[in-house]
Image (cartoon, helix red, strand yellow):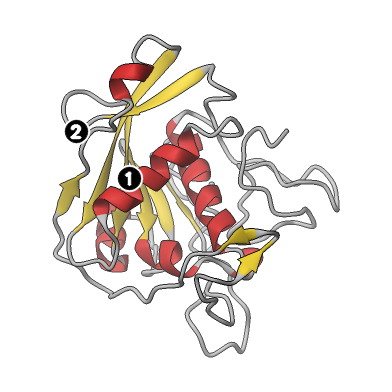
Amino acid sequence: MAVAARDGGSGDGRRPPRSARPEAAGTRAAAPRTPGSPRQARSPKQRRDGRRQPQRVRVPVSGTGRFTTAPAAASAARFSGAARTVRYAVDVEGGLPFDAAVFAAQVQRILNDPRSWGHGGRVRFVRVAHGPVAFRVSLASPALTDRLCAPLVTGGELSCRSGNRSVINARRWGQGAVTYGPDLASYREYVVNHEVGHALGHGHEQCPGRGRRAPVMVQQTKSLQGCRINPWPFPG
C-alpha cells in the first residue's frame, strides 16, 4: 500500500530504505501457481458482492521496456477551478495486454471516487500528459518493475513506489492477490490507492482490530492481519 512502498518486505529480514519500500504479493504454501494469484479466474460476467468483475489476464514477464504516457483526462479543465488539484500522469509499458487509455481511465475513476484520497471532492486529481506532476502511476511488466524498484528485491511479483513513480506490477493488476480472492475489481482499487497513498506521504498502518475494516495503508496484499478487505482511504 514513505517515499517508496509495497506491502511487506522482500522476506530476507532486511528493512528496505525509506526511499524505496516495496509491496509484497500474498502467497499460499504448496499452491502450484504464481504467488499472490487467486486459485481460479473469473469470467467478466461473474460478479462479486453485486459488482462486475474484470477478466483475469496473464501477463508476460517482459514488455518493451518503454512507457507510453496516457493522454490528459478530458475533465482536466473542468477540475482546474473546482477544488485543490493534484496533477499526475499515467504511464503504461508497451507489450502488455492492457490498453493505456483504459488503464488511465480506471486510475482517474479510482482517485476521484469520493472514497479515495480526494475525500469527496476536497482534492481533485487531474491527469495530464505534459508538464510537472506530483507523481506518476506506472503499469509495468514484472521485469521492468524489478528494474525500477531496484535495489529492492521485487522478484517479478511485487509493486513499489520509487522516486515519483507509483509502480503497479502488471502481474498483480492482471491476477489480483490471494487476500482479495475473486474480487479483482476491489483489489485494483486497493493497489492504486495504496501506492498513491505513499506518493502522498502516507506510511503503512496496522489492522486496528479483528473483523474491522483494514485501513488502505495496511499491507493488504500480504495479509489482512485479521481485518476485512478495504480498498478505500475514506470508505464511509
Which mark is drawn over residue 104? 1
**Residue at image point 47% right, 46% down:** 192
**Which three-letter amino acid code belongs to the residue tagged 2?**
Ala
Q: In which quarter of the image is residue 60?
A: bottom left
Left or right: residue 108 versus residue 132 is right
Give the residue pinned by disc 2.
129
Asked if 31 appears above or below 52 in the picture, the reply is below
Q: Which of 77 and 128 is in front in this view?
A: 77
The answer to whether residue 10 shows anywhere in this view is yes
Q: Position of residue 49 (x, y in %)?
A: 70, 60
The residue depicted at 46 percent of the width and 70 percent of the height is 55
In this orientation, which residue lies closer to the viewer: 133 or 120? 120
Q: What's the mark number on residue 136?
A: none
Q: Quadrant of the C terminus?
A: top right
Name the residue rendered at 26%, 58% in the picture: 99
Q: Nearer the viewer, residue 16 or 83?
A: 83
Residue 116, x across and y down, in percent: 56, 34
In the rendered view, tell whether residue 86 sits above or below residue 106.
above
Mark 1: which amino acid? Ala
Q: Distance between the residues labelled 1 and 2?
A: 11 Å
Observer able to see residue 18: no
Task: Decide if residue 20 is on the left or right side of residue 191.
Answer: left
Report the residue at 57% width, 76% height from top.
38
Classify mark 2: helix, strand or loop: loop
Q: Check the image and report above or below for 214 versus 66.
A: above
Q: Earlier in the sequence, mark 1 or mark 2?
A: 1
Q: In the rendering, at what x and y percent does residue 180 appear?
A: 63, 63
